[in-house]
Image: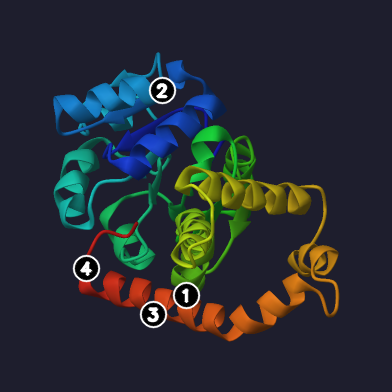
Amino acid sequence: MNELRTVGIVGLGRMGLTLAAAFGRAVGPDRLFGSGRSAASVARFEQAAPGARTASARELPGLAELIVLCAPQSALPAVLDELRPRLTADHLVVTISNRQPLSVLAEAVPGPVAKLIPSAGNEIGAGATLLVPGPGMTPLAVEHHLELLRTFSTPFVITEDQGRAATDLASCGPALLAAAAAAMAQAQRRRNAPLPPELAEQLATCSLEAAGRLVAAGASLPDVIDRVAVPGGNTAAGLAAAREGLAAAWRAAFRATEDNERSGHPAH
């Protein structure tokens, strides 16, 4: 498989639009195509990737080498029926669903397959992407795909059985961390701290941003903790009090994501 130069996205929900913005940056809007079921989703696609074009799912294989399946799991059989007549062994078909086994997808299409788990930050060139190479995807094809992903993310190659746990950290992570910061601000307000809600949220947001920038500059997570948590100091006392509760909260969150995925609800 040659270097991927054209991309078609089927399904223009939240993650489809995130990838539209990301791939629009990676390949250029003239090489990006989207297929949505409603006029509203098409309008959102055109806003997310100005200059990109829309097409029916049946037309996409004639326009794009990389086909990204962002449609709901329940709609995938019908989507594949539309795509299949024009798919060839030269197309790479990628699903963003952890619930779609790659062995099953490989039986439905003539070419290589993979999973791609995006993150909300990809639309601004940040965050992780998770790539699970599937049947038919050669090491050279993997490297070509990673090169494409590096234009808008930090990509990681994982195995299919790592998908759920890795998705919790990489894809669910931004929302979970934002919720944790919001909970910090709310906890101070519930203690009757003399802080307006807007100020409390701004301060928590600045802390979240500062931690991210320190890590981006090369600090590890333990490094960030050690820079602030002086032994015997207030931060160290707060960490000691919160550590077990935080760990229990994250374990509960990850159990919930796993249970939700097994139940067949939306992945993100």
Given contact means CB atoms under 8 Å apart, are the residues at marks 2 and 1 in contact? Answer: no
Residue 112's x, y, as percent? 43, 51
- Closer to us: mark 1 or mark 3? 3
**Is tag 2's residue or tag 4's residue first in the polypeptide sequence?**
2
The residue where tag 2 is placed is 49
Q: Nearer the viewer, residue 12 or 62?
A: 12
**Can I make out residue 11 in this image?**
yes
- Name above or below for residue 265 compared with residue 50: below
Earlier sequence position, callout 3 versus callout 2: 2
Residue on which the image places disc 3: 255
Q: Gap between marks 3 and 2, in whole Å? A: 35 Å
Q: Nearer the viewer, residue 214 or 207?
A: 207
**Closer to the camera in the image, 194 or 34:** 194
**Label of residue 161 in the image:** 1
Answer whether residue 88 is visible to the viewer in this image.
no
Q: Residue at x 17, y 53 (%)?
A: 77
Instruction: Tell which circle, 1 or 4, labels the residue nearer the N-terminal end.
Output: 1
Give the x, y percent position of residue 106. Answer: 34, 59
- In the picture of the structure, the residue carrying the numbered disc 4 is 264
Query: Would you say the residues marked 4 and 3 are in contact, meaning their CB atoms lie under 8 Å apart?
Result: no
Q: Is residue 236 left or right of residue 53?
A: right
Residue depth check, mark 4 versus mark 3: number of the one nearer the observer: 3
